[in-house]
Structures are given as C-alpha cells and as structure tokens.
Amino acid sequence: MHLSIIAVGRMKSGPERELVERYLTRCRGVGPAIALQGFEVSEFAESRKANAALRKSDEAKFITGALDANTSLIALDETGSSLTSEKFANNIARLRDDGVSHLSFVIGGPDGLDYSVRTRAAQVLSFSPLTWPHQLVRIMLAEQLYRAATILSGHPYHRS
C-alpha cells in the first residue's frame, strides 16, 4: 500500500522539515518488509481568499485534485477520533490487508478542512483536541507513521 501526506501550508527549510524527512526516510526503510511504500508529502499553499469558507473551499480543490478515485483518505482534525498508536498501526494494516492501494492523510490549513474533504474521508482522526500548527502536525504524523511501521514489523521502537 502506498502512503502519502497531503498538507495545506508550505514548510520552509529548517529543523521541522528535516525532522519530517527523517521520520519518512525511516518509514521508507521499514515499509517494504510490511508492504508499505511511498511516504511522500504533497503540499499546497494556503488560500488567500477573503474569508474562511472561501479559503477552505479553495484548498479543498487542491486536496481533492491530488487524490485519485482509489485513494482512501484519513483527515486530521481536532474534532476527529483519538486512537492509540497500536490502533493507528492496526488501522493501517487492516486497510492494507483489505486491498487499499493508496492511503493519504490530509492536514488542513489554518481554517481547517472543508466539509467536502471531511465527508470524502474514510476517517477523521485527531492527535489532540488542541489546535496545532500544520508544521507540528506534519511532524507528529510522520513520527506516528514511523511508529506504526515499527509496530507492524515487530521493531522495538514502540514500547507499550
């Protein structure tokens, strides 16, 4: 199964981008043994429309334009459900085992995700009820993808 991250907001060069890439590089090393690949990031600039509703709608066009019909989508939003790392890993494994060929995680912009993206998502996931900057969410997601890959491969990175 191919995994990818779609993010609204461009990450500048620096320690945040380096940390995301470090975790995704680790994922690419562990992934093939457990039938996971890709671990790529597509990022889009934040919309400059006049109000939040127009910005979210504009950003939704970029997000949905990056998806093909066979992509399963998990949206990240503070109002979503919370999972343990083990359940997060097991969800990825279940989707892989069910034959999902591409799984994308989407991170919205400062105004959040448009309703059309949330309803397109198979799951809406929250890392916390707190609101986080997209750079930190991207780091946390990359780390959780690496943690999930290590859980599924039996690597001792994750300790319960």
Image (cartoon, grey):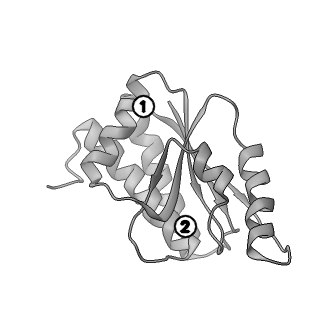
In which quarter of the view is residue 34 placed? top left
Q: In the image, 155: left or right of 45?
A: left
User: What element does badge 1 sit on?
Assistant: helix
State the residue at coordinates (75%, 69%): 53
Question: Which circle's residue, 1 or 2, is located before the other in the chain?
Answer: 2
Find residue 18 and name its label.
2
Q: Position of residue 78 (x, y in %)?
A: 46, 68
Q: Position of residue 153 (x, y in %)?
A: 28, 36
Identify which residue, 137 or 11, lies in the foreground: 137
Q: In the image, 47: left or right of 125?
A: right
Q: Are marks 1 and 2 in contact (CB under 8 Å)?
A: no
Regarding residue 35, the answer to whether it shows in the image is yes
Placement of 125 over or under 119, stated as above or below? below
* Crowd rating for badge 2 (residues with CA inside 10 Å; few <14, some 14–19, many 20+): few
Regarding residue 46, the answer to whether it shows in the image is no
Instruction: Please state which amino acid type lies under the numbered disc 2.
Output: Glu
State the residue at coordinates (43%, 31%): 32
Toward the left, the furthest residue is 160
Viewport quadrant of the C terminus = bottom left
Identify which residue, 42 or 156, lies in the foreground: 42
Q: In the image, 127: left or right of 62?
A: left
Placement of 13 over or under 31, stated as above or below? below
The residue singled out by tag 1 in the image is 95
